[in-house]
Image (cartoon, rainbow, N blue to C red):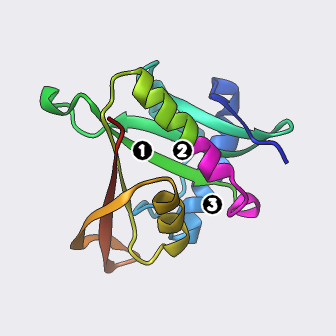
Amino acid sequence: MSVDVRIATREDMAAILSIYNQGIEDRIATLEQDLKDMAYMESWFSQHDSRYPVFVANVGPNVVGWADLHPYSHRCAYASVGELSVYVKRSWRGKGVGQALLRQLESHAMEHGFHKLVLATFPFHQAGQGLYRKMGFREVGIFRRHGKLDGQWVDVMWMEKLLV
């Protein structure tokens, strides 16, 4: 199986939306609880640019995952810190799609002057943590009772990877 990663286009938004909604339904990747629609996706997509892109992973003609880089903070002191998100279609999880997306994000970040990548994950999401650790990320800390998911407080773990 060959996973090809490329910059996403507007034509990919339906597939990205479907995969994102799977992540929302599965309650393992985001504090979002309500499924998103195409209007939401169009607004989200328009916030990305050449420095903060969206990538998709293709196996053949099918989009099986996506990742994006977005600002950690809009303060100038953090201009070289990028926050990322990675989502993989249910049937493709654990098959190298996340690794391919992270490799591309890291390469892009280094080419665009980032010195660090950060992400938030749930402490109970062991598969995600395994991927991030395998790719060189380390746990920074856990915010206790940081957000609510389905009416219950959940902890959020932050991870980082220094690029330079």
Q: Tag 3 or tag 1, which sits nearer the N-term?
A: 3
Instruction: Name the residue at 58% across, 70% down.
Output: 26
Q: Tag 2 or tag 1, which sits nearer the N-term?
A: 1
Q: Residues within 10 Å of mark 2 (few under 14, many from 20)?
A: many
Location of mark 2 (residue):
102
Q: Is residue 81 magenta?
A: no
Residue 101 image offset from top left, x and y in percent: 59, 42
The amino acid type found where label 3 is placed reads Gln
The front one of 14 and 141 is 141
Q: Report the quarter where the C terminus lies.
A: top left
Q: Would you say the residues marked 1 and 2 are in contact, meaning their CB atoms lie under 8 Å apart?
A: yes
Up the image or down, 51 lies above or below 114; here it is above
The amino acid type found where label 2 is placed reads Leu
Instruction: Name the residue at 73% across, 59% down.
Output: 95
Residue 99 image offset from top left, x and y in percent: 61, 50
Tag 1's secondary structure? strand
Q: Which quadrant of the view contains residue 3?
A: top right
Q: Which mark is residue 84?
A: 1
Q: Is residue 34 visible?
A: no
Tag 3's secondary structure? helix
What is the chief secondary structure element of the magenta stretch?
helix
Q: Given this view, does label 1 or label 2 mark the residue nearer the observer?
A: 2
Tag 2's secondary structure? helix
Segment tinted magenta in the rendering: 90-102
103 sits left or right of 57 in the view: left
Residue at far top of view: 50
52 sits left or right of 90 in the view: left
Distance from Cα at disc 1 to Cα at disc 3:
18 Å
Residue 35 image offset from top left, x and y in percent: 54, 57
